[in-house]
Amino acid sequence: MTPTLPADHRELISDLSGIVCDYPSTDPESTLAVLADDAAHALGRDATSEGRRERAGYTILLHATCWYVSARVFSKSLFASYVQVLDGIRVQLDRSNCTCPVDSHPSQLDSEYQVEAGVSMLTEAGRAAFAEDYDLDEAEVAVFDCEGFLADLADEAAGQLREASQELFGTVDVSHLDAQFVGDDGRLDLVAMQDAIRRTWENNTGPVALWSARRWLAGQVRDEERIGLFLCLWMGIAQTYEGLPPSFARDLATALATIDLDVSCDHPQHPWSTADSTVQSRYLAVVHLYAPEDHPDTPVPAELSARELWECPVQYAQLARKALQDLEGWRTMRGGDDEDWEN
Ligand SMILES: [Zn+2]
Ligand SMILES: [Zn+2]
């Protein structure tokens, strides 16, 4: 009889494969939290052969999914669960128990294969089915239980998570941008800031937005530079479609909170509404405002280019509302806990 996986394990393979291929069909944050939780429970059964089978399976699964936790889910508690269970697994593993021939540990396994291997290793039936599907002999299956192999996976996953955790939740230093954006006379070089945002391939939007937010919050901005600085902050948010992590979003939200949303005016239209929602159109609008001789083209018509219209509190409020929506969208998209996102 052909061995088969239990139905819930076939479903687990399908859910986790969707996640590691970056096309999740379930909510990744809760699916991965359940995985880490199940792995933690299995740790307590390490004295049994069932527990050791599960330890191998879960170590492979945590390793396979850790890139997604590092890059796609901005949740401190999920990070903590992963690191805790990986550390717990690591304590149980002794590399000196490895008796494999040199270089015989599987390496560079693709994530989908790891998902299938990991889920299969959890049960005897799964192992038999996996061995048959991939035509593996006993030794080739046994290597998945090797403590040296599993220790390597656990160390690699925990290391990657610790590094990513600092980037996602720690304090990001953008002070090197002072030299690029502040002139000797203390003026902001808004054209240089716009040029940086326009170089999308350099992933500048997040750092420029964060730098702008901190400058704004420190009040290090001349009156005539305020709208330009605010628009650099705004564009950094509006043009980061994949979302920025809490290490960026916290200061962005604090800067936006300084804008009064309860304002009104009699203007039928404000200048920013005439710029297309493209990087180029927005770029032209801002650089024209600060260097009209060098940049004569702008989408903003002359009748809407009065400084008073640019500085209207209602336009600031409209911009802030849109940016706050974007930040909320990142939280919905990326998950995580409320306190991770707040200063
Ligand atoms: Zn080994
Ligand atoms: Zn107005």
Image (cartoon, rainbow, N blue to C red):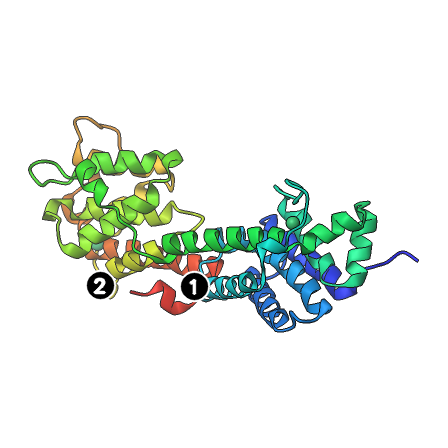
Q: Amino acid at mark 2?
A: Asp
Q: Name the residue located 36 percent from the left edge and 63 percent from the top edge.
A: 341
Q: Name the residue located 43 percent from the left edge and 67 percent from the top edge.
A: 337
Q: Would you place residue 173 above or below residue 48 in this image?
A: above
Q: Is residue 191 left or right of residue 70?
A: left
Question: Is any part of residue 304 visible from this angle?
Answer: no
- Tag 2's secondary structure? loop
- Tag 1's secondary structure? helix
Separation (CA) of disc 1 from disc 2: 31 Å
Question: Is any part of residue 114 visible from this angle?
Answer: yes
The quadrant of the rendering that contains the N terminus is bottom right
Q: Amino acid at mark 1?
A: Lys
Mark 1 and ligand 1: say if the CB distance to the nearest ligand atom is below 8 Å. Answer: no
- Quadrant field for ligand 2: bottom left
Q: Mark 1 Cα within 10 Å, few/some/many (few <14, many 20+)?
A: many
The quadrant of the rendering that contains the C terminus is bottom left
Q: Mark 2 Cα within 10 Å, few/some/many (few <14, many 20+)?
A: few
Direction left: furthest residue: 185
Using the image as rendered, state which of residue 227 and residue 150 is in the foreground. 150
Q: Earlier in the sequence, mark 1 or mark 2?
A: 1
Say the numbered circle drawn on residue 260: 2
Residue 258, percent across and down? Answer: 21, 61
Direction right: furthest residue: 1
Q: Nearer the viewer, mark 1 or mark 2?
A: 1
Q: Would you place residue 74 above or below residue 281 in this image?
A: below
Using the image as rendered, state which of residue 170 and residue 86 is in the foreground. 86
Confirm or deny contact between disc 1 and disc 2 (CB under 8 A). no
Say the numbered circle drawn on residue 76: 1
Mark 2 and ligand 2: say if the CB distance to the nearest ligand atom is below 8 Å. Answer: no
Q: Would you place residue 88 above or below residue 244 in this image?
A: below
Residue 30, percent across and down? Answer: 56, 66
